[in-house]
Amino acid sequence: MKRVSIVILNWNGKAFLEQFLPVLIKYSALPGVEIVIADNASTDGSVAFLETSYPGIRLIRLEQNFGFSGGYNRALARLDSKYFLLLNSDIEVTERWLEPLLELMEQDELAAVCTPRIRDYHRRDHFEYAGAAGGYIDRYGYPFCRGRIFDHVEADRGQYDRVAEVFWASGACLLVRAALFREAGGLDERFFAHMEEIDLCWRLQRMGYRVFCEPGSTVYHVGGGTLPRGNPLKTFLNFRNNLLLLYKNLPSRQRRKTIPVRMLLDTLSALRFIWQRSPADFLSVIRAHRAYRGLRKYYRNNLVANNVNRESVNFAYIYPGSIVVEFFLKGKKRFAQLEGKFRKAVTDD
């Protein structure tokens, strides 16, 4: 058994592999660590490049594009390791990036997932949108990070240098215990891509485990390597999957209160897209709601399979208010401006 399998799920990311794989190999040369590339049926010559330039790296060729969730589930099922490290192809790692993550996991047997500090590859003194210094959601399911709320990304001035328990870790760089990944059922393939890592982290917390950000490890993320921001498909997946996330994981009573409000807020977002002259994004929100309604039947019929401590959610790491209100109406754009309510929630709990 390997100690760690670092797994890059690649889809037409040859340029990123050429750029970042040498650095990954250089800084990941530890005993018991292997690098695996799982290719999601790329058409850009990625496979030929890997076979020619890196014949020693394990390559898993998938017969079609199964998306983020399906691709990782199929690849990880073939591996025998204590830990899986999911890594985007557009991540640049740094010296000693892996050791702090492993040390944290080894010191706390309840730690199921750990993520590093994620900075922007292009603005290297800023956090990166997708993960920053660990993620949270508010009571209506809106995700945000230590270091990023909506489109406002903070400069990294050391304000989040402490290890923190968080609600979710970015799938761009995520270390998870392999046994718990399997026990939780892996990634939900109906999500296809986007927010599946938040769903996984939520399920693991319902099982009694914890999620951490270890800022002693730093990586740099290009972002938008597969689906750039502003892509209507990305809009569709984010809105649909956010609703599925709430439907799957909230207790029944909380779900009945939360989802109607969230759908109303989504409607306001759709109207905002019209005001911004983005009709494709407007239609994506409408399609997302329709698709969510279609998938509810599946989850309703399979709630037993998804019912690990479903009625006992730890709300300490779910922001008790609305970040829509805090950000757009109150002008609170930094995580530190919200942190007091988290402390109160933890104390009250």
Image: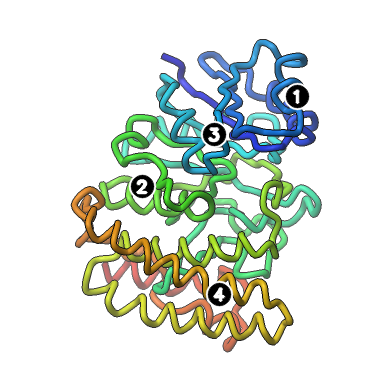
Label 2, on which residue?
210
From the top left corner, tell me how far across and down residue 303 is, in percent: 22, 56
Q: Quadrant of the N terminus?
A: top left
Q: Is residue 317 visible?
A: no
Q: Is residue 162 visible?
A: yes
**Left or right placement of residue 169 versus residue 133 in this view:** left
Q: Which amino acid lies under the numbered mark 3 shown in the image of this protein?
A: Pro
Q: CA distance from mark 2 to mark 1?
A: 32 Å
From the top left corner, tell me how far across and down residue 193 is, in percent: 53, 50
Circle nearer the viewer, 3 or 2: 2
- Of 171 and 120, nearer the camera is 171
Q: Quadrant of the C terminus?
A: bottom left
Q: CA distance from mark 3 to mark 4?
A: 28 Å
Q: Earlier in the sequence, mark 3 or mark 1?
A: 1
Local crowd size for mark 1, using a 10 Å CA cut-off: few (<14), some (14–19), many (≥20): few
Q: Earlier in the sequence, mark 4 or mark 2?
A: 2
Q: Earlier in the sequence, mark 2 or mark 1?
A: 1
Q: Which amino acid lies under the numbered mark 2 shown in the image of this protein?
A: Arg
Local crowd size for mark 4, using a 10 Å CA cut-off: few (<14), some (14–19), many (≥20): few
Q: CA distance from mark 3 to mark 1?
A: 21 Å
Give SS at disc 3.
helix
**Left or right placement of residue 218 versus residue 190 in this view:** right
Give SS at disc 2.
strand
Label 1, on which residue?
22
Name the residue at 65% across, 42% down: 218
For the residues bearing labels 4 and 1, Cβ distance under 8 angstroms: no
- Of 201 and 132, nearer the camera is 201
Label 3, on which residue?
100
Circle nearer the viewer, 3 or 1: 1
Label 4, on which residue?
337
